[in-house]
Image (cartoon, rainbow, N blue to C red):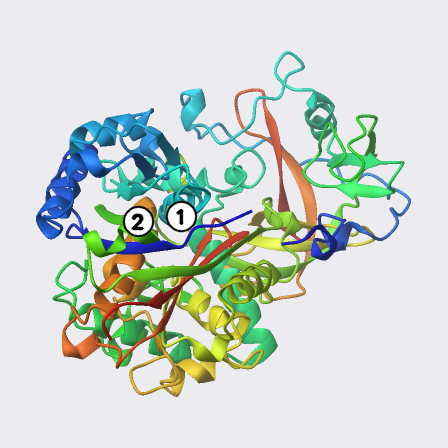
């Protein structure tokens, strides 16, 4: 089968944070921002629309959200319109679906959007909604939410490999520092030293507040087009070169090892093979640091750090500017906040911005060619990976 | 991902043979006093337990007798958690019920010190953990009662217990061994 080349040609995000805006207002805001950012994009160009939203039924009591969001954004998709839901990876799912639609010839110009509204008057209700991501009838009644699960992951990594709280704080310090150069980040104006991070309250031992990403409101959008249309929108397309995904369990009883994420190894292998590159060729990566320990294990599973050495990799600054590769220059989920459906789309926006040299120097990756985006979802039971190559007038 | 590289068995830790069921654990402690307010179904984590709602009602009936059980596929010799109505390996629907061993050891644990879901706020702080059952190839997640989280350790002996959640339904949890 012939697969068409697909380019990501632009995108933007709203401010992430605790926003005095409804779900619908966030959708309108990202629509306005997208068409402001890309004046060459006309609403009638957009034939397909993919909306990443994890829990609008819970957080906004709204179903059938794809046409709901399309109306907010002034879009009338006429080929494919659908919502993608994959919990924390809902946004990347929207982009992967747009990629598949264009590659197959079903779509020529697709918009992939992520919207999530998480801050509600009752945060206990929001926490209950987050717990539904787990197996709610069997894990939920025990109080299974993300923090205690990833805390157990951290506990096992500390036991098996000697990873320390200080190494986890190094991840958080880096990502919060990058967020200080990203005005759209939730923690743009908040400074976190390692010492300060190590004094924050414990949320789920051993994880402290600074080890955990936040409940965040926000939206993001990107535009993907078939290769022959890319020049209409940009001279610096980001080519989708590879993608992979893997799901191997759901109930926590079936997780197996907490520190060896085999699903991520499989998804990464598939993505690298399709792109025809190796892990060492990645110049920067936007990976899923929902918790500091996640980024540490991801260093290992992608092959950037040796098994068990992810903590040392972080402490040595190997994921920082000047290190082996730059990880989470956008500020990560830790620094930007984590509006579930919007996160994966905002990561792709960062790829476009880095490729077009549109970021401040404090987080600018020098002359990047290859970028990787990763999301895990749920209890790290699904992993989604995309690989982009910079094209155009370099 | 090609079919060859996908593991045929959904999870490797279920692959060893099922041991003989061990005797029922000690009788359930006195029912917990009713502390949960009645919540709408869609804000209530506890499953519906009766035979008009689930084909797994036997699990909950057995819980009332103090025993945590699950289903097993005799064809594949596969112990399944949570209990199911169809085998994920052969897709056969003739599964059998087996009682689980009542004892195990903590493989990992943490605690919820804040940010609890609706209805659990008054239970904070509470400990949760993954428990390797003694004599069965299962690692179950659950609430850990008995000792505060900062007195737990990996390898800690715990036992399964069932409890009345206060509205006629029963559930299970772990308690540290004395």
Quarter residue B30 falls in: top right
The image shows residue A257 at horizontal and vertical percentages of 64, 62
Q: How crowded is the residue under tag 1: few (<14 C-alpha within 10 Å), some, or many (20+)?
A: many
Question: Which chain is disc 2 placed on?
Answer: A
Front in this rendered view, residue A157 or A236? A236
Q: x%, y% of residue A110?
A: 30, 41
Q: Nearer the viewer, residue A162 or B92?
A: B92
Residue drawn 88% across and 49% down? B17
Task: Place residue A160 in its image quadrant.
Answer: bottom right
For the question of whether residue B177 can be seen, the reply is: no
Q: Is residue A332 above or below residue A245?
A: below
- What residue appears at the point 15 percent right and 52 percent down from the top-left corner? A15
| Residue drawn at point x = 35 percent, y = 61 percent | A239
Helix, strand or loop at mark 2: strand
SS under mark 1: helix
Name the image quarter holding the N terminus of chain B. bottom right
Q: Which residue is mark 1?
A: A99
Q: Position of residue A61 (x, y in %)?
A: 29, 26
Q: Is residue B53 visible?
A: yes
Identify whether A149 is placed above or below A33.
below
Q: Are marks 2 and 1 in contact (CB under 8 Å)?
A: yes
The residue that label 2 is drawn on is A224
Give the class, few, some or many, for how many residues have Cα within 10 Å of label 2's Cα (few <14, many ≥20). Answer: many
Closer-to-camera residue (A14/B113): A14
Labels 2 and 1 within one chain: yes
Left or right relative to A164: residue B11: right
């Amino acid at each position: 089968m012939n697969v068409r080349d697909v380019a990501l040609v632009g995108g933007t995000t709203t401010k992430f944070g605790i926003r005095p805006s409804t779900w619908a207002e966030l959708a309108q805001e990202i629509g306005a921002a997208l068409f402001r950012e890309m004046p060459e994009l006309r609403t009638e160009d957009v034939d397909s629309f993919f909306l990443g939203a994890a829990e609008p039924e819970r957080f906004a009591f709204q179903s059938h959200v794809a046409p709901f969001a399309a109306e907010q954004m002034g879009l009338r998709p006429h080929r494919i319109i659908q919502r993608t839901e994959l919990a924390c990876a809902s946004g990347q799912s929207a982009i992967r679906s747009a990629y598949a639609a264009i590659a197959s010839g079903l779509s020529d110009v697709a918009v992939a959007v992520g919207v999530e509204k998480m801050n509600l008057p009752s945060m206990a209700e929001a926490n209950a909604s987050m717990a539904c991501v787990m197996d709610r009838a069997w894990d939920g009644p025990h109080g299974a939410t993300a923090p205690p699960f990833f805390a157990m992951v951290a506990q096992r990594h500390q036991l098996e490999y000697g990873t320390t709280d200080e190494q986890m704080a190094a991840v958080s310090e880096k990502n919060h520092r990058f967020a200080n150069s990203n005005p759209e980040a939730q923690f743009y104006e908040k400074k976190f030293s390692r010492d300060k991070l190590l004094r924050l309250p414990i949320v789920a031992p051993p994880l402290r507040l600074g080890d955990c990403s936040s409940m965040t409101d926000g939206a993001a959008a990107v535009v993907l087009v078939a290769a022959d249309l890319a020049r209409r929108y940009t001279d610096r397309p980001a080519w989708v070169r590879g993608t992979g995904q893997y799901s191997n369990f759901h109930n926590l009883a079936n997780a197996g090892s907490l520190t060896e994420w085999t699903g991520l190894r499989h998804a990464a292998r598939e993505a690298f093979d399709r792109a025809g590159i190796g892990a060492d060729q990645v110049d920067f990566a936007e990976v899923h640091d929902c918790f500091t320990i996640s980024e540490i294990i991801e260093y290992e599973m992608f092959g950037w750090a040796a098994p068990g050495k992810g903590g040392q990799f972080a402490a040595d600054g190997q994921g920082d500017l000047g290190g082996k590769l730059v990880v989470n220059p956008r500020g990560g989920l830790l620094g930007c906040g984590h509006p579930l459906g919007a996160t994966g789309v905002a990561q792709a926006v960062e790829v476009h911005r880095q490729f077009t040299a549109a970021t401040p120097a404090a987080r600018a990756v020098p002359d990047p060619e290859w970028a990787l985006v990763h999301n895990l979802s749920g209890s790290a039971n699904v992993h989604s990976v995309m690989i982009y190559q910079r094209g155009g007038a370099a | 991902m090609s079919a060859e590289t996908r593991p045929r068995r959904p999870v490797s830790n279920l692959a060893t043979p099922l041991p003989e069921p061990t005797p029922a654990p000690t009788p359930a402690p006195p029912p917990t006093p009713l502390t949960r307010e009645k919540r709408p179904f869609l804000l209530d984590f506890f499953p519906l337990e009766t035979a008009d709602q689930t084909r797994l009602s036997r699990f909950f009936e057995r819980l009332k007798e103090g025993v945590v059980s699950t289903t097993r596929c005799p064809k594949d010799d596969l112990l399944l958690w949570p209990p199911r109505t169809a085998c994920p390996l052969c897709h056969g629907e003739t599964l059998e019920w087996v009682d689980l061993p009542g004892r195990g050891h903590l493989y990992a644990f943490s605690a919820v010190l804040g940010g609890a879901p609706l209805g659990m706020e008054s239970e904070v702080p509470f400990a949760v953990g993954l428990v390797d059952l003694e004599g069965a190839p299962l690692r179950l997640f659950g609430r850990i009662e008995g000792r505060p989280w900062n007195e737990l350790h990996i390898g800690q002996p715990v036992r399964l217990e069932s409890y009345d959640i206060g509205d006629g339904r029963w559930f299970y949890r772990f308690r540290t061994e004395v």
